[in-house]
């Protein structure tokens, strides 16, 4: 976990005083669930991968990225033509040409696989969500969305019935 990664444990410390008697492990688990839901619903965690090499006729391309994340959706795929046009000059491919395979591969339907090879010719943008067991999130996401994630987790915990930390008045 590099310096650009923030742990959920740091958020737990900020929350436990408002949830009397709630074990830290339960707070962390709720942060993990709320973080997943937040990013799945909002679609704000977008990553553009380093350009991949196009291989003629190849249908499957591995999606590699850092962190405790998983691909929720492929947002955009752009291919440079054989002439090597710049990506900003190229329209995105129709999403019906490809799909997410086994959560880790971009797979083209056979009729749409590129029929030429070009080094660094494919740009892919992904929508990511944290894994269910993620220990944290990239710092830029925590800095921007921590309050929303913490508020959502606190709401879910406070509305639990018959717990020492239940507070239905504040869980609104």
Image: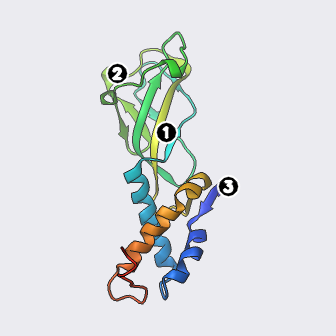
Q: Which residue is mark 3?
A: 2
Q: Disc 3 and disc 1: Cα gap in Å?
A: 21 Å
User: Disc 3 versus disc 2: distance between alpha carbons?
Assistant: 38 Å
Q: Is residue 81 above or below residue 3?
A: above
Mark 3 vs mark 2: in front: 3
Q: CA distance from mark 2 to mark 1?
A: 18 Å
Query: Residue placed at 48% from the left, 32% from the top?
Result: 124
Q: Which residue is mark 1?
A: 63
Mark closer to the chain start, 3 or 2 = 3
Q: Nearer the viewer, residue 156 or 72?
A: 156
Q: Residues within 10 Å of mark 3 (few under 14, many from 20)?
A: few
* Placement of 171 over or under 88, stated as above or below: below
Q: Is residue 147 above or below residue 168?
A: above
Q: Is residue 134 above or below residue 13?
A: above
Spot the residue most to the top.
83
Question: At 40% across and 77% down in the image, what residue appears?
Answer: 157
Q: Image quadrant for the N terminus?
A: bottom right
- Density class for disc 1 (Cα within 10 Å; few <14, some 14-19, many ≥20) is some
* Badge 2 vs badge 1, beta-carbon distance below 8 Å: no
Dot 2: element: helix
Q: Which secondary structure, mark 1? A: loop
Circles 3 and 1: CB distance less than 8 Å? no
Q: Secondary structure at mark 3?
A: loop
- Residue at the spot 43% in from the left edge and 38% down from the top edge: 105
Decide which of 22, 17 is in the foreground and name it.
17
Q: Residues within 10 Å of mark 2 (few under 14, many from 20)?
A: some
Tell me which label, 3 or 1, sits earlier in the chain.
3
Residue in the foreground of this view, choosing between 152 and 75? 152
N-terminal of the pair, mark 2 or mark 1, is: 1
Q: Which residue is mark 2?
A: 112
């Amino acid at each position: 976990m590099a310096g650009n990664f923030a742990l959920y444990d740091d958020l737990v410390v900020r929350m436990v005083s408002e949830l009397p008697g709630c074990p830290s492990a339960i707070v962390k688990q709720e942060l993990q669930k709320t973080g997943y839901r937040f990013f799945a619903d909002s679609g704000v965690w977008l990553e553009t991968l380093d350009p991949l090499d196009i291989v003629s006729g190849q249908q499957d391309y591995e999606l590699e990225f850092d962190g405790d994340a998983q691909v929720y959706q492929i947002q955009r795929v752009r291919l440079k033509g054989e002439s090597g046009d710049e990506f900003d000059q190229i329209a995105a491919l129709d999403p019906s040409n490809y799909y997410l395979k086994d959560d880790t591969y971009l797979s083209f339907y056979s009729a749409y696989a590129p029929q030429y090879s070009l080094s660094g010719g494919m740009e892919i943008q992904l929508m990511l969500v944290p894994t269910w067991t993620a220990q944290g999130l990239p710092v830029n996401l925590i800095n921007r969305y921590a309050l929303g994630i913490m508020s959502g987790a606190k709401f879910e915990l406070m509305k639990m019935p018959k717990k020492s930390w239940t507070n239905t008045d504040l869980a609104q």
